Image: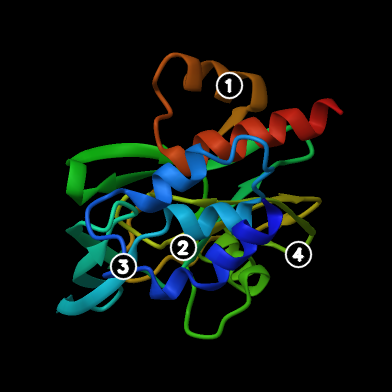
């Protein structure tokens, strides 16, 4: 059984045209109940293979692709994919255990959101350097200790954006220096109040929810 499984995985690239509309990969996996599938093997059964990729829009930050793909059941479908350079977000925690946040207008949803500082990576920029830069630009935080909390895909249903989330402590607060097209209102809330704001639906920005909850968990350890 193990030998058959390995042979199938090795011949995975040759499957197209051999099993037409029989959902072969799905059925094959269903019949191997006694085999333990690790993530690498499962990837070969579930992946969607790109047949054709067309760049339909390229902006200053994003690229949008319209792709034709092959499903696990060997049928064709289309996917719309947004390519993003990646980003960071940081939870700045003061000595008084307050979190520094920004209130910022977000054009796509026509709302002002309460968020942790964040920003996109410049080309070739290490995530930690981006975090330091965004802390200074958005909320005037300089120095201190920055620790990685977690890594998340922000919207994997349509985008490849990968975000690194950090916590910052023991820093010095100075005047912020936002970009010319950024308009921010800086606020501070105790951590427990931030948690309540999440529960009440006041803080709804996903990266901020994740970062604040991770920070609460970390500080309770």
Q: CA distance from mark 3 to mark 2?
A: 47 Å
Q: Nearer the viewer, mark 4 or mark 1?
A: 1
Say whether residue 79 is left or right of residue 92.
left
User: Badge 3 local density, few (<14 within 10 Å), some, or many (20+)?
Assistant: few
Q: Which label's residue is closer to the chain start, 1 or 3?
A: 3
Q: Is residue 185 in view?
A: no
Q: Secondary structure at mark 4?
A: loop
Q: Where is mark 2, residue-wise?
A: 119
- Residue 18, horizontal then vertical, whole percent: 31, 67
Say whether residue 33 is left or right of residue 95.
left
Mark sitting on residue 195: 1
Looking at this view, name the residue that lies furthest to the bottom: 124
Q: Which label's residue is closer to the chain start, 4 or 1?
A: 4
Q: Secondary structure at mark 3?
A: loop
Q: Which label's residue is closer to the chain start, 1 or 2?
A: 2
Q: Quadrant of the C terminus?
A: top right
Task: State the residue in front, 1 or 103.
Answer: 1
User: Badge 4 local density, few (<14 within 10 Å), some, or many (20+)?
Assistant: some
Instruction: Tell me if residue 176 comes above or below residue 193 in the rendering.
Output: below
Q: Where is mark 4, residue-wise?
A: 143
Q: CA distance from mark 4 to mark 3?
A: 60 Å
């Amino acid at each position: 059984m193990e030998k058959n499984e390995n042979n199938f995985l090795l011949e995975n690239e040759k499957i197209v045209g051999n099993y037409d509309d029989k959902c072969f990969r799905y059925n094959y996996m269903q019949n191997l109940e006694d085999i333990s599938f690790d993530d690498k093997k499962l990837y070969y059964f579930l992946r969607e293979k790109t047949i054709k990729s067309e760049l339909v829009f390229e902006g200053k930050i994003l690229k949008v692709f319209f792709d034709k793909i092959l499903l696990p059941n060997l049928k064709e479908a289309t996917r719309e994919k947004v390519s993003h350079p990646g980003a960071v977000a940081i939870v700045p925690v003061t000595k008084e255990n307050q979190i520094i946040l920004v209130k910022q207008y977000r054009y796509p949803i026509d709302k002002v959101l309460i968020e942790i500082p964040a920003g996109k990576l410049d080309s070739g920029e290490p995530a930690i350097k981006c975090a330091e830069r965004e802390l200074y630009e958005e909320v005037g935080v300089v120095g201190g200790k920055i620790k990685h909390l977690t890594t998340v895909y922000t919207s994997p249903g349509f985008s490849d954006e990968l975000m690194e989330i950090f916590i910052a402590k023991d820093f010095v607060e100075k005047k912020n220096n936002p970009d010319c097209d950024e308009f921010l209102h800086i606020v501070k809330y105790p951590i427990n109040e931030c948690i309540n704001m999440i529960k009440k639906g006041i803080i709804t920005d996903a990266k901020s929810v994740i970062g604040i909850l991770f920070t609460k968990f970390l500080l309770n350890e």
